[in-house]
Structure formats: structure tokens, C-alpha cells
């Protein structure tokens, strides 16, 4: 039974990621997500408190990891512990492996706690290079 619930949750996350990528947070439809996952809308709310909790579940790990990468990037630039080329390779690898999540964070997060995420990252980089 646990595997079935976990499978449903993972399917919802995958379909939700696509819905948020296509329509953004504000226009994403929980009904469309549940229909594509072949579950009731209530199933989404079994796993997530609300739409923003669902959105956060899809993006939080990436948002935290990317911010951490940039902070480490900035620190290593200041201290000289890594070359710029090495830092750039790590960031590009991260970005390519999280393309959809990054696009959602940057372009589709209006109305969520991630709405100012791009600006937060810019501040980290500005502080490093100043």
C-alpha cells in the first residue's frame, strides 16, 4: 500500500512540474493535474496542504541546493579555493540537471514565496563580485 501512495505522490509531482512549467503558479490548475494523474483533486490535498505547498514540494530541494551552490561559488571566488572554470562547470551541470525547476523558479513563480528568488540569487552574486 505504501508504494502505491508513494507512486501517486511521485506521479503528481511530475505532472505538477509540467503544469507549473507550462502555465505558471497562478494559472496552473489542480483539476488538470489530478485529471492527468488519473486521481481525484482530493488526492492532491491528501499529500499537500494547498497549491503553494504542492508548488514548494516540487521546487524546494532545487531552490535550496541552487542557492547553496551559488553561496559556495561566491565563497570560493573570494577565497580562490576553486578556479572560475571549475565553478562554472559545477553551476552549468546543476542548471542542466534542473532545467525545468530553474525555469519555474525564474519565470513561473509569481504569487509564491519564490517570486523574488531571482533577485535573492543576484544579491548573492553581487556580494561575491563586489
Image: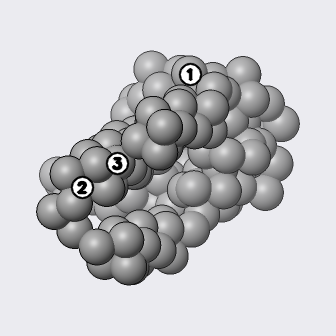
Q: Which mark is residue 74?
A: 3
User: What secondary structure is marked by label 1?
Assistant: loop
In the image: residue 118, left or right of residue 120: right
Q: Dot 2, crowdedness within 10 Å: few (<14), some or many (≥20)?
A: some
Residue at left offset 22%, top offset 60%: 80
> Would you say the residues marked 1 and 3 are in contact, meaning their CB atoms lie under 8 Å apart?
no
Instruction: Give the residue number, with chain letter if any, for mark 1.
Output: 113
Image vertical order of residue 15 relative to residue 105, above or below: below
Q: Are marks 1 and 2 in contact (CB under 8 Å)?
A: no
Can you say which quadrant of the picture contains the N terminus? bottom left
Q: On the rendered structure, is 28 left or right of 118?
A: right
Image coordinates for residue 87, horizontal then vertical, percent: 34, 69
Q: Nearer the viewer, residue 70 or 109?
A: 70
Q: Is residue 100 left or right of residue 66?
A: right
Query: Which element carries disc 2, helix, strand or loop?
Result: helix
Lateral position of residue 93 relative to residue 100, left or right: left
Q: Residue at x 37, y 71 (%)?
A: 84
Mark identifier at residue 15: none
Disc 1 versus disc 2: distance between alpha carbons?
28 Å
Residue shown at the point (55%, 56%) measured from the top left = 101
Of tags 1 and 2, the one toward the viewer is 2
Q: Residue 88: x and y, percent?
A: 42, 72
The Cα–Cα distance between marks 2 and 3, rounded to whole angstroms, is 6 Å
The residue carrying pointer 3 sits among few (fewer than 14), some (14 to 19) or many (20 or more) residues within 10 Å by Cα, namely some
Residue assigned mark 2: 76
Visible residue check, residue 127:
yes
First in sequence, mark 1 or 3: give its number.
3
Q: Quadrant of residue 49?
A: top left
Circles 2, 3 touching at the beta carbon (< 8 Å): yes
Crowding near pointer 1: few (<14 within 10 Å), some, many (20+)? few
Point out residue 31 in the picture as x, y percentages from the top left corner: 72, 40
Amino acid at each position: 500500500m505504501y508504494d502505491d501512495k508513494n507512486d501517486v505522490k511521485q506521479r503528481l509531482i511530475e505532472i505538477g512540474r509540467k503544469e507549473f512549467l507550462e502555465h505558471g503558479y497562478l494559472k496552473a490548475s489542480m483539476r488538470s493535474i489530478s485529471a492527468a494523474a488519473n486521481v481525484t483533486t482530493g488526492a492532491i490535498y491528501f499529500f499537500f496542504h494547498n497549491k503553494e505547498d504542492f508548488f514548494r514540494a516540487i521546487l524546494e530541494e532545487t531552490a535550496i541546493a541552487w542557492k547553496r551552490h551559488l553561496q559556495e561559488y561566491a565563497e570560493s571566488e573570494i577565497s580562490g579555493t576553486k578556479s572560475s572554470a571549475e565553478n562554472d562547470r559545477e553551476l552549468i551541470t546543476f542548471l542542466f540537471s534542473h532545467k525545468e525547476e530553474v525555469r519555474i523558479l525564474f519565470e513561473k513563480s509569481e504569487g509564491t514565496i519564490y517570486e523574488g528568488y531571482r533577485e535573492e540569487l543576484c544579491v548573492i552574486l553581487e556580494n561575491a563580485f563586489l
